[in-house]
């Protein structure tokens, strides 16, 4: 390597100190210079930019922290960049910008993007952000997202297993949901070109932190037990709004969150075909669009009773939220069922959850379809439950085409509930009691999101 003869030696550079005034830079060859500023000495690299075709200078470091040998190595590296038609100053600016893209900053942008798309509820978003705050940000939140690798995520998930306290979920389920959030944040970074394609370190973590097997919400399905549950609900002496919501839910076959968010503008009680139309954005599967519930005579009676005492925005306002835009809490219906002894713990009664009314209806209506003589079929049952169909175009057609049959079905179901109310355990058909679901009500992320 050719050196400039007047270049100081390594020991001379080490002994140099600022003189309090600016001096002419000393050249060390190959674009490396030592700049003398009034208060400091700075290693710089001078080059002809392959991008702007102008002379440029970039800072390398400062002696004595950076020795002459280290400065030469860095100058050689920058020179190789220039030879590869890359501008060192632009590369450094890009790297600094990438360093500012911490995992926490990117996850906040991810949350904003989800809010704009409107495909998840505010509750789901808040839960995800709470998990990030509790389990992820303390460990990797301040680190540049580009620097994170798979090995950096394993301690995060280990911490969830050791310290899960959120919402009473079991540790295994919460760990898997945190893993899903991590994957979605990295996917967002790839979509925004913060990360390169195929560089998601959370993509292959599932085999290490898989959720336990999905189970259904607990539900009674034996006719005599359904009747006993209906009688218990009729006799319940809780708060008026909770009582009415508990009486209405079996009749409309909705998920608890879809029921609790009901607004009077969605419901038409007058005329020959009373109907409840829920906008798609309030449904669990938003892509299906508006969901239509034909209302039985029994459902109309309950809603008229509610309307007589409540003319606010929501059908089921919270106790102190009738004028504040607050609905019945997400735990109110299950708490009422617990009070009735359907918690599956210290009571001879079977376990039943508010979401389980859907399984109750599904099981009984399919039984009626199998027995024959009905004007509706199993497809009507699935459409009324707003389950996820794979062919959305065909499903949209079916939802309209089968509405008359579904109206008949909803009235048949309401009448069946009245019939089962009158049953005693002795009236139950042989073998029917064995149809009761004994499943735990632990679910996957998708089911919980709609509750």
Image (cartoon, rainbow, N blue to C red):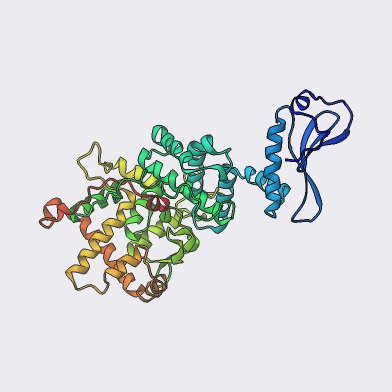
Q: Name the residue nearer the viewer: 197 or 78.
A: 78
Question: In the image, 204: left or right of 103?
Answer: left
Q: Position of residue 285 (x, y in %)?
A: 43, 61
Question: In the image, 286: left or right of 2?
Answer: left
Rendered image quadrant of residue 299: bottom left
Q: Name the residue nearer the viewer: 240 or 26.
A: 26
Q: Residue furthest top?
A: 15
Q: How many marks?
A: 0
Q: Name the residue nearer the viewer: 296 or 280.
A: 280
Q: Position of residue 203 (x, y in %)?
A: 44, 50
What's the residue at 21%, 43% (across, down)? 349
Question: In the image, 239: left or right of 1?
Answer: left
Q: Position of residue 78 (x, y in %)?
A: 70, 45
Does residue 114 appear in the picture of this structure?
A: no
Q: Name the residue nearer the viewer: 321 or 35.
A: 35
Rendered image quadrant of residue 293: bottom left
The quadrant of the picture occupied by the N terminus is top right
Does residue 348 appear in the picture of this structure?
A: yes
**In the rendered image, the vertical position of residue 298 relative to residue 99, given as above or below:** below
Question: In the image, 172: left or right of 34?
Answer: left
Q: Position of residue 80 (x, y in %)?
A: 68, 48
Rendered image quadrant of residue 295: bottom left
């Amino acid at each position: 390597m050719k050196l400039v003869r007047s270049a100081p030696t390594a020991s001379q550079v080490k002994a140099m100190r600022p003189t309090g005034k600016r001096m002419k830079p000393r050249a060390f060859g190959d674009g490396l210079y030592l700049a003398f500023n009034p208060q400091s000495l700075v290693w710089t690299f001078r080059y002809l930019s392959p991008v702007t075709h102008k002379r440029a200078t970039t800072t390398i470091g400062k002696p004595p922290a950076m020795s002459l040998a280290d400065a030469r190595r860095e100058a050689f590296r920058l020179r190789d960049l220039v030879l590869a038609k890359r501008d060192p100053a632009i590369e450094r600016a890009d790297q600094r910008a990438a360093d500012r893209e911490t995992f926490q900053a990117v996850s906040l942008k991810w949350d904003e993007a989800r809010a704009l798309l409107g495909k998840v509820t505010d509750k789901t978003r808040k839960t995800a952000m709470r998990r990030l705050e509790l389990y992820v940000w303390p460990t990797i939140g301040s680190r540049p997202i580009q620097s994170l690798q798979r090995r950096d995520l394993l301690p995060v998930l280990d911490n969830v297993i050791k310290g899960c306290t959120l919402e009473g979920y079991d540790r295994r389920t919460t760990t898997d949901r945190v893993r899903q959030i991590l994957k979605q944040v990295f996917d967002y970074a790839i979509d925004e070109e913060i990360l390169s394609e195929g560089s998601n370190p959370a993509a292959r973590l599932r085999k290490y932190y898989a959720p336990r097997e999905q189970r259904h919400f607990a539900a009674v399905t034996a006719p005599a037990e359904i009747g006993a549950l209906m009688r218990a609900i009729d006799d319940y002496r809780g708060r008026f709004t909770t009582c009415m919501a508990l009486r209405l839910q079996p009749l409309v076959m909705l998920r608890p969150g879809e029921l609790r968010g009901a607004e009077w503008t969605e419901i038409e009680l007058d005329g020959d075909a009373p109907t409840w139309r829920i906008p798609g954005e309030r449904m669990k599967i938003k892509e299906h669009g508006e969901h239509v519930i034909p209302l039985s005579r029994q459902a109309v009676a309950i809603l008229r009773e509610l309307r007589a005492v409540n003319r606010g925005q929501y059908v089921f306002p919270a106790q102190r939220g009738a004028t504040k835009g607050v609905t019945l809490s997400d735990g109110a219906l299950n708490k009422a069922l617990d009070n009735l002894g359907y918690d599956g713990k210290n009571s001879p009664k079977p376990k039943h959850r508010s979401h389980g009314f859907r399984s109750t209806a599904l099981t009984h209506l399919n039984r009626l379809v199998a027995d024959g003589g009905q004007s509706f079929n199993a497809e009507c049952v699935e459409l009324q439950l707003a389950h996820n169909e794979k062919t959305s175009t065909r499903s949209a057609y079916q939802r309209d085409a089968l509405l008359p049959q579904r109206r008949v079905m909803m009235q048949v179901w309401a009448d069946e509930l009245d019939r089962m109310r009158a049953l005693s355990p002795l009236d139950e058909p042989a073998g029917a009691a064995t149809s009761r679901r004994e499943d735990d009500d632990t679910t996957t992320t998708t089911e919980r999101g709609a509750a």
